Amino acid sequence: MSFMKITASGLAITVACAAAASAQSRDQVQVAGSSTVLPYATIVAESFGENFDFPTPVVQSGGSSAGLQQFCQGIGENTPDIANSSRLIRESEIATCAENGVTDIMHVQIGYDGIVFASDINGPEFAFTPADIYKGLAAQLVVDGELVANPNTTWNEVNPDLPEQPIIAFIPGTKHGTREVFEEKVLAAGCEESGAMEEITAMSDEDTAEAACVATRTDGRSVDIDGDYTETLARIQSDSNGIGVFGLSFYENNMNTLQVATMSGVVPSTETIASGEYPVSRPLQFYVKKAHIGVIPGLKEFVEFFVSDDMAGPNGPLAAYGLVSDPELAATQAAVEAEETM
């Protein structure tokens, strides 16, 4: 099993191999899941290893859905202790967990992040609305009362105020929690904002309309990225017409090559996300198996350290990397100390 491990200094990726320790006691905390939460978890893991008498936790990436799938496989040393997620756990995942004996789950929110649209720093500037993204990337649009394949090929065909640049977007693949937030807060919101939701519902029914609103085109103009944000960045570097979907923190750490679009007239920043002014933001969190506390050495200590003021507070290293600190952090700290479950 390969584990992606990122050091806090420079976040350079190294790969460490660890055998599944089903036959013998495991002394390292194991973390799986969200590539958005990955850098934060790694910063905490490295600092934890340096400051506590426990081994450095092993942090694995792969996406929120993949991490939760591993997390829900059961209780035991050959399953992850923690699943990082950029979306909330689904009811179906809670049911799968329960079927496999994972019943006492702690939900730990670490802060907030924004989803941004960024492009080549030398290209034109973009000022998007959710409706623009929907009209550019939806598989089908209503034209003259009929649902037809999306005819738009350049952004100025979507909105004459946008640049005359080919529509090419690199969006999170379906295994990423970011995709769910992108669908809900951008595509579905844009479908509603443009009036298409009402038109499609009138032609069919609400369920059909909701599905049509978030279905993306498959003609090469909307490209699913199954890897992490470094792959999205590489795609833009190889095609300067590309628009990429990133977490705010990743963009802020790559401002030498990327420029960010406004959304509904708002520039994404930690300030506009904290105030709620920027419309495309989401909480970041992780889930902990309570049954592993007291069994896996250092697990509770790691969780407490993760949400401490020193790490997750507004003046800590996670905020310095781009996390928007949670104003309810004290309540989270108390819940962790009490080992409260969902």
Image: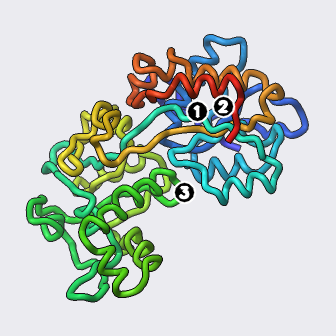
Residue at the limit of the structure toward the right, as seen here: 23
Tell whether label 1 touches label 3 (CB within 8 Å): no
Q: Is residue 307 above or below residue 188?
A: above
Q: Quadrant of the C terminus?
A: top right
Tell whether label 3 touches label 2 (CB within 8 Å): no
Q: Residue 240, percent across and down?
A: 23, 53
Q: Residues within 10 Å of mark 2 (few under 14, many from 20)?
A: many
| Label 3 vs 1, first from the N-terminus | 1
Tell whether label 2 touches label 1 (CB within 8 Å): yes
Identify the residue at image location x=24%, y=65%. 167
Q: Residue 77, percent across and down?
A: 82, 37
Which of the pair 133/276 is nearer the observer?
276
Q: Residues within 10 Å of mark 1 (few under 14, many from 20)?
A: many
Q: Quadrant of residue 297?
A: top right
Would you name the residue on which mark 2 appears? Answer: 58
Identify the residue at image location x=17%, y=51%. 126
Would you name the residue on which mark 3 appears? Answer: 175
Q: Residue 228, percent across and down?
A: 47, 47
Q: Quadrant of residue 341?
A: top right
Is 104 displayed left or right of 148 in the figure?
Answer: right
Is 232 displayed left or right of 4 in the figure?
Answer: left
- In front: mark 3 or mark 1? 3
Amino acid type indicated by mark 3: Lys
Would you name the residue on which mark 1 appears? Answer: 5
Which of the pair 68/24 is nearer the observer?
68
Gap in Å between the C-alphas at discs 1 and 2?
A: 7 Å
